[in-house]
Amino acid sequence: MARFFEERFSPSNSQAAVAVTTVVAIVAAMALASPLFIAVGADPLAGYWALLREAFATTRGFGFSLVRAAPLTLIALGTIVSWRAGFGYLGFEGCFVLGATAAAWLGLHASAGLATGPLSLVVFLPFALLLSFAVGGAWASLVGVVRARFGGNEVLISLMTNYIAIFLVQYLVSGPMRAPGGLPESARLPRETWLPFIIPGTRAHAGVLIALVACGLVWTLLRKTAVGYEMIVAGLNPAAARYGGIEVGRRLILAAFLGGGLGAIAGLVELLGVQHRLVEGMSGGVGFTGVVVALLARLNPVAVLPTAIVFGGMTVGADAMQRSVGVPSSIAFVLQGLIVLFVLAGELLRRYQIVFFPLRSRARRKAIV
Amino acid sequence: MAKLVEMRGIVKRFPGVRANDGVDFDLAAGEIHALLGENGAGKSTLMQILYGFHQPEEGEILIDGAPVVIVSPRAAIAHGVGMIHQEFMLVRPFTVAENVILGLPGERGGWLDLARAAKAIRALSARHGLAVDPAARIEHLPIGVQQRVEILKLLYRRARVLILDEPTAVLTPQETVGLFAVLRSLAAEGKAIVIVTHKLREVMDVSDRVTVMRAGRVEASMATTATQETELARLMVGRDVALRAKKAVREPGPVVLRIIDVRARDDAGYEKLRGVSLDLRAGEIVGVAGVDGNGQSQLAEATMNLRPVESGRIELRGVDVTRATPAEHRAMGLAYLPADRRGVGSIVEMTVADNALLGSQRRFTWGRRIFRDESAICAHAARVVSRFSVRTPSLDFAAGKLSGGNLQKLTLGRELARDPAALVVEQPTRGLDVGAIETVWAELLAERAAGKAILLISAELDEIFNLADRIAVMFEGRILSVLPAGKATAETIGMLMAGRAARRTEECETLG
Amino acid sequence: MNGGMIDSAFFVTWLTGAVRLSGPVLLASVGEIFGERSGVLNVGIEGSILLGALASYLACYETRLVWAGFAAAILVGLFIGLFLALLYVTARASQVVVGIVFNVFAVGLASFLYQASLGAAASPEIVPMLEPLRLPWLSSLPLVGRIFFNHPPVLYLTFALVAVAHVVLFRSRFGLSIRAVGENPKAADAAGVPVERMRYVGVMLSCMTGALAGAYIVLAQVGMFRDTIVSGQGFIALSIVIFGRWSPWKAAAAALAFGAADALQLSLQLFNSGIPPQLLLSLPYVVTILAISGLFGSKARQPAALMIPYVRN
């Protein structure tokens, strides 16, 4: 009487086991990448040391690691919220740029509309956060509705919405929102909208704090609220969820809204913390690397920030590694890829199958004896 | 006449059960042989062994007198044995011809020759009265015609033995007549046909011989003309029903749940409930007996609106709840324990505490019903666990790791903790060991004593006889009869389960 | 606004551009059609295109032979396909997760291998490229000649491949089997079709045509390799497969539609019209989304078992 029993991707594993597998994966990846060093005549250990030291042991380097980690964290949180509710959303690139656009628009027009004196960050930031979140959330909810009401494949649809969002921003940045000067970018945002630096001597900005707060909020949502419970159940077992009185469709749309909102905040953070103007190509693929960070963290909100710092730090340390031992900096990407592959392989080996909730309910077969 | 197929001493074990316990079965060319039994009898397993899905642990199979080992369905086909499952193996967007030739080596190298296939199909169709258009797409064909395509697939592959698993489950009466005519035609040509069934109509109308199986053994095997329905029914369900539970006689109270002429379809769109009516009173257990697949699951789901009711009504304590959400049902006092306890009744990846919470997640909250009240949740879970003796190392233990019995106690306890007025339980003790069964039975009887109304849907006659005050038998989406437990015998119930109404000489009430 | 500038020259330029741009993504989509028809969504096709582009560049750089580049791409595609199929089909890992992770990994690997092989060269070197091939009579046709028959030979080969793919998919045993696997793997298995093997073949075809598409970009369009040479063509190929209803000729039409939108925005920029080019660029995506959203009846005729791993019960 075989029962087809699937274990879905859930972070109910012991924390210790997760940490151990991650460390083993990192070490294995480093070992496997060593031949690449040697092939170009570089010493792997010296290289790794240079990378780690630059990314985490120097103040300035660590600051850069944090800067990288902030948007990654937010996208990873968005992934967690949506994927764990059973919504396989991949449109974070789009949410990112739309969130940045919303914040840029507000920043450029805010001082004009204010009746009471000059703009201040304390006033501006909450509104910017709200607007960005709402825009990104609404954008992702469209896909959520298509999935919940019409059964469309959210993976494919969300991949394509990325393009539409990117084209929209391209248009804005070459037209209505373009700064005089001819380049496809907006005017620079007023200083009052810039996120302040939080660690002296580094370029780590308050966006890191926003990411930290978001981690806490997502954790609270999933672990401490009834709605979070319902979302998780809907993602793990929609049939049981419906049986338990949960309105699966509504939870799905909510997950879409929250995931998209978080993705948008990632864009806001990058805009107000680093770029200070809306540019084409701001996202640089973070919509996908953020997803990878979430996977590395096993979709656990607590593990996201450290994972993002490690991941982001590797990109930061790569240049230092290149300077120190002469190996091309892109080896950091190879390392990142290997780490993720090993972590996932470890998960598979422990007999967890990462399977998305299929689009149609599958009839559970009972062997008729 | 030499036997075409002989199976001798077949033994097959699955974890916890001997599905086939020394079974002998034989088949002659040109005969239609019915394999009769209820759930768990072992008939499907036996045929799956013949078809190569499983390997027997002991015993041998002979075809044309020579021993064979059938390692896979492909090997079975090579030996001329074909099987048609309850779930058709057809590719819906493909045409009939494409489905028939799928997987076969072609005549023209790698290229399809649909024209030639169509011609062959038409010839086979004409010969056996299997009217089918080779160019029609499966998705546009009614289910009866799809079954013909399945038969054609086997004939095209020159099968000599055709095994049909519950073939009339999805057919209309007219389609059934048509199918039987085809089967007779095939048998006349020398094919051997096995019909795996629980329906007496199929046995009596079309079979030459019948073998009755029960609990993994062959009870009897004889020519159909040499037996009658009553004997077959008795053999099928057995005479002795061990009465273990003591229950006091109770006067049932007012009606709590009314199911009025309900019609509903299953996921594939076929009508599974064809006008079911039933009244459930406080303090009584109504047992719904019947072989799996006659609409019981759909009935259970419909009571909680987990399956839309197409026509008819469901009333709970006088209130029309036909379109109410599951949450509303719960709030109004209906509890439901589904048969699929791992797939629907619980979330195996979550903890015991979180499972105990399912259905009540809005109740144990604070802050305007937003935040989880962890201490209340734990207390609730602890109450459930202790009251129902769920053996678990902790409340944080993964529910999926609990034994079947403990998981069932947990889900039952969760539902009962809400103090429902009516309880719908489906196959509550399937797969449980004796101790767990006793516990669950005791709980249900206790709820009955406390004045709850219980609808017990079960394929186990033991369970029905032990617990039910009244017994309703479902067959093909209808309730054939409702009998007081005192008046029901294994024989009468067996007949009803197999589709034959009780004889006139016995007293019975029939509802709906 | 320029009323008089939209004339036949505009159309010719535009349509020629459409055909030219559609080549690589169409090529990638042909293999992906087989992959998806067998039930596997290969998000990693983006990475395959990138690595194929790199392989073809390096091979051509070393040998100065264009066809060596294409051969290298095929080999690379074969290996990537085997690797991904192992994860998609045998390990039954989530197809989306594997695809995304592979893409990220491929970006790093390509960048690293390029830098390692050629050093941090200041200006990347151009390799021999394929020239437009003039076909004897066809290229001289008045309008049609310039639009359709003045392209590198790979474009004609791509369209030939489309024709072959169509015939194989719908008229051969292999095609029937692979379609069955993607619709109802249980039925296919019961009929004796080797489900896992079919899916392996599908994935490998997808990666091979993907890698070839990368070679196409390098050796027939750009002439050199950059980190950013592949940025979304893989996802466009996925969109083309859907828009083209998993059918080779319809995919060709879809590819031309995407190419037309792309070329139109370039042409319109030249002519300074008021229409935002991005609007046109988004149009194919919007249409594709509407097609698979389920808003209009039968939610696309997508292979019923797409993205669902198969386990014999």
Image (cartoon, coloured by chain):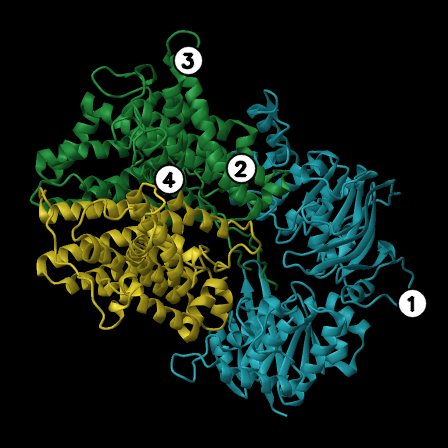
Chain colours: A green, B cyan, C yellow
Please give the residue where the numbered disc 4 appears in the rendered image: C276
Q: Residues within 10 Å of mark 3 (few under 14, many from 20)?
A: few
Up-down relation of residue A89 to residue A186 (above or below): below
Up-down relation of residue A257 to residue B510 (above or below): above
Q: CA distance from mark 4 to mark 2?
A: 31 Å
Please, which residue is most extreme toward the left here? A41
Please give the residue where the numbered disc 2 appears in the rendered image: A253
Question: Are the residues flagged by discs 3 and 1 in contact, CB closer than 8 Å?
Answer: no
Is C271 on the left or on the right of A132, as rendered? left
The residue tagged with tag 1: helix, strand or loop?
A: loop
Callout in the foreground (2, 3) = 3
Inspect the image, locate mark 3, and give the three-letter code of the amino acid beneath it: Val
The N terminus of chain B lies in quadrant = bottom right
Q: Is residue B96 in view from this perspective? A: yes
Q: Dot 3 falls on which chain?
A: A
Quadrant of the rendered structure where residue C69 is? bottom left
Is B294 on the left or on the right of C15, as rendered? right
- Residue at the spot 41% in from the left edge and 27% down from the top edge: A102
- Which residue is nearer to you in this view: B54 or B242? B54
Callout in the foreground (3, 1) = 3
Please give the residue where the numbered disc 1 appears in the rendered image: B504
Inspect the image, locate mark 4, and give the three-letter code of the amino acid beneath it: Pro
Q: CA distance from mark 1 to mark 2?
A: 58 Å
- Residue at the spot 59% in from the left edge and 87% down from the top edge: B123
Q: Which mark is residue C182?
A: none
